[in-house]
Image: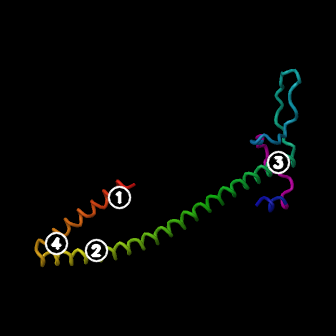
C-alpha cells in the first residue's frame, strides 16, 4: 500500500508539515545525540531530517501493517476453523437425532409387544424376570470374588 505513494510523493516532509512527533518505537530517532556528557542533558528541539524521517515513519508503518496483516490472517484462520467445526457438529447432531429417533421407535415397539405379552400371560412373566435378576446377581457375585 505504501509503495504507491513512494513513487509519486518523494518529499514526505511536505506532507507532515509542522506536525513534529518523535517515532514511537524508539528504534531510529531523528534526534541528534543530546546531552553534555556530564549527566546534564540539554533539551534540544525536535528537528525532523526530511526524507530520512519520513522513510523511518514509513518503515514503522509498514512494520505495523505487516503485524496487523498477520494478526488478521490468524483471526481469519481461527474463524474459518470455528465455522468448519460448527458445520461438522451440526451434521453430526442431525445424524445423532435421526439415530435416536429410530432407536426410540424400536424401543417403543419392543415395550408395546412386551406389555401385550405380559397382559396375555398374566403374572407368570414377573416370575421369569425375578428369576433372571437372581441369576444375574449370582453371576456378578461369583465374578467379583474370583477376581
Separation (CA) of disc 3 from disc 1: 80 Å
Q: Which mark is residue 125?
A: 4
| Residue bearing mark 2 | 107
Q: CA distance from mark 3 to mark 2?
A: 75 Å
> Residue 127, position in %: x, y?
16, 68
> What residue appears at the point 66 percent right and 55 percent down from the top-left corner?
71
Question: Residue 108 at what x, y percent from top left?
Answer: 25, 75
Q: Could you tell which of marks 2 and 4 lies nearer the N-terminus?
A: 2
Mark closer to the chain start, 1 or 4: 4
Q: How far apart are the alpha carbons under marks 1 and 4?
A: 27 Å
Q: Is mark 2 in CB contact (under 8 Å) with mark 1?
A: no
- Prevalent SS, magenta region: loop
Q: Quadrant of the N terminus?
A: bottom right
Q: Which residue is mark 3?
A: 56
Q: Point out the tag, 2 or 1, that comes first from the N-terminus.
A: 2
**Residue interval drawn in magenta:** 7-22
Please indicate whether residue 113 sits to the left or right of residue 61 in the image. left
Evaluate whether residue 67 shows in this view: yes
Dot 4, how many residues are within 10 Å of its Cα: few (below 14), some (14-19), or many (20+)?
some
Amino acid at each position: 500500500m505504501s509503495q504507491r505513494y513512494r513513487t509519486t510523493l518523494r518529499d514526505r516532509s511536505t506532507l507532515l508539515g509542522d506536525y513534529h512527533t518523535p517515532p514511537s518505537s524508539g528504534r531510529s530517532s531523528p534526534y541528534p545525540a543530546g546531552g553534555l556528557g556530564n549527566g546534564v542533558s540539554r533539551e534540544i528541539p525536535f528537528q525532523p531530517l526530511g526524507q530520512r524521517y519520513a522513510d523511518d515513519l514509513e518503515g514503522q508503518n509498514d512494520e505495523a501493517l505487516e503485524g496487523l496483516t498477520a494478526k488478521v490472517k490468524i483471526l481469519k484462520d481461527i474463524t474459518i476453523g470455528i465455522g468448519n467445526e460448527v458445520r461438522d457438529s451440526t451434521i453430526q447432531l442431525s445424524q445423532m437425532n435421526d439415530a435416536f429417533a429410530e432407536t426410540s421407535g424400536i424401543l417403543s415397539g419392543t415395550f408395546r409387544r412386551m406389555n401385550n405379552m405380559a397382559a396375555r400371560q398374566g403374572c407368570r412373566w414377573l416370575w421369569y424376570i425375578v428369576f433372571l435378576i437372581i441369576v444375574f446377581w449370582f453371576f456378578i457375585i461369583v465374578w467379583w470374588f474370583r477376581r
